Image (cartoon, rainbow, N blue to C red):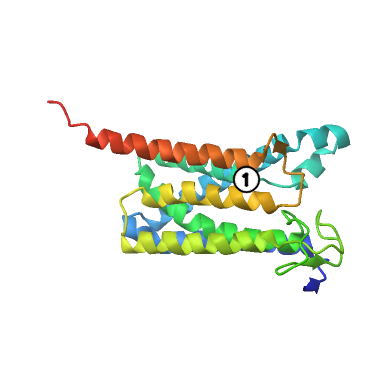
Amino acid sequence: MPKGNLSMNFSVYGLFFALGIAVSAIVAILICKKRKIERYEIVYSGVFTMIGGVVGAKLFFLLVSIKLIIETKPGILDLIRSGFVFYGGLLGGIAGLFIYVKKYKLDVKDFFDIFATVTPLGHALGRVGCFFGGCCYGIPHEGFPSYTYSSAAGNAPVGIPLLPIQLIEAGCLLLLFATELFIFIGNKGKKGMESLIYITAYPTIRFVTEFFRGDIERGVFGLFSTSQWVSLILIFCAIAYEIISRSRKRIPSQN
């Protein structure tokens, strides 16, 4: 059961967060030619995606933390420095990317497939940052694997063996990234396949890993956490989209 000093936890979290964005952007620039997309378009669309992601992640955090905000009455600077929620960032990023491709009349599926391919990589690095930052921590767990924070790190309890669910999720995300990249580079699927895989695979991963989260600040409604409800909605939408798409292909065109 390893122990460590995480006194620089938030600076390390910020480092991995920035690293995740940078590495994802680099990979997107390297693979965009497979869809005949210019690299400058990846940079510009990335700016729209990042702005939408940051705004969405912050708004979603404020939404799920509204009860705590009312009770503690933090200042504006405290709210700015407070956390983010990935699903809010994902939805905001999708909105920002959609605005860009529609504004410049580009192929939505091409850009979304690239976004879906590289996002798991950046997210995985972000989860490593969560581990060092002491957020999104796991439930108490005595066996292998477990980690004990020996000093204050985020909201993680000190001196209690915890399941390192952040690293487990990071491993799942890296596997998803490898799968997406293999399909994208090898043209193994139809256009839009990478997006469909991501929007079903990640919510499934998130739904399961949420059961092993020990932090209660993320919001719980009824049987499931906020992220689990969002996961179910996304999975339902992805399945519904695929069913409708296939049914349309079976309907013969009428002249």
Q: Residue at x 47, y 51 (%)?
A: 198
Question: Looking at the image, is 176 positioned above or below residue 192?
Answer: below
Q: Residue at x 65, y 59 (%)?
A: 127
Q: Residue at x 82, y 60 (%)?
A: 153
At which x and y percent is residue 100?
Answer: 45, 41
Numbered disc total: 1
Q: Farthest residue toward the left?
A: 255
Q: Is residue 250 left or right of residue 204?
A: left
Residue 100 in view of the camera? yes
Residue 154, by quadrant, is bottom right
Q: Which residue is mark 1?
A: 54
Residue 15, by quadrant, is bottom right
Q: Is residue 90 left or right of residue 102?
A: right
At which x and y percent is residue 64?
Answer: 71, 37
Q: Secondary structure at mark 1?
A: helix
At which x and y percent is residue 68?
Answer: 82, 37
Query: Which image quadrant: the N terminus?
Result: bottom right
Residue 158, by quadrant, is bottom right
Q: Is residue 151 left or right of residue 203?
A: right
Q: Is residue 15 left or right of residue 238?
A: right
